[in-house]
Image (cartoon, rainbow, N blue to C red):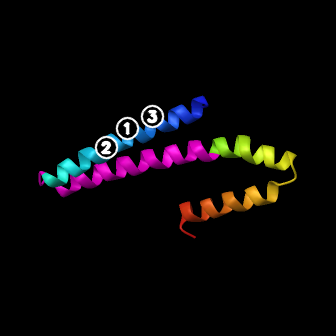
Amino acid sequence: MTDQHKKAIQMLKTSKGQIDGIIKMIEEGRYCVDISNQIIAAQSLLKKANMIILKQHLNSCVKEAFKNDQGEEKIEEVMKILEKITGK
């Protein structure tokens, strides 16, 4: 496991804690704007973790695929993910 993977895991664990906190806020009937702000914070952390994973993928799997003449397939995979991220 790389340092980048460890960093992504830590971010995901933190976001998991945030989500648990958000659920508790909703159950307690807390102020909606406060809940929304916490949801935004959790989403931001999830996006950052995803970018770390994608960067690691590009720097390892995609590089290796190009060495083995399989780069086009990996590029297509990444493009599909980017389409999901951008909503296009």
Name the secondary structure under disc 1.
Answer: helix
Q: Amino acid at mark 2?
A: Gln
Residue at 49% from the left image edge and 49% from the top image edge: 47
Q: Are marks 1 and 2 in contact (CB under 8 Å)?
A: yes
Name the amino acid type tagged 3: Gln
Q: Residue at x 24, y 44 (%)?
A: 21
For the residues labelled 2 and 3, say whether their Cβ atoms are less than 8 Å apart.
no
Badge 1 is on which residue? 14
Image height check: is 45 above or below 4? below
Does 73 sit left or right of 86 as displayed?
A: right
Labelled disc at residue 80: none
Q: Which residue is mark 2?
A: 18
Q: Are marks 1 and 3 in contact (CB under 8 Å)?
A: yes
- Characterize the local packing of mark 1: few (<14), some (14-19) or many (20 or more) Cα atoms within 10 angstroms: some
Q: Which label was assigned to residue 10?
A: 3
Going from N to C along the chain, the mark reached first, 2 or 3, is: 3
Residue placed at 58% from the left, 70% from the top? 88
- The stretch in magenta equals 28-54
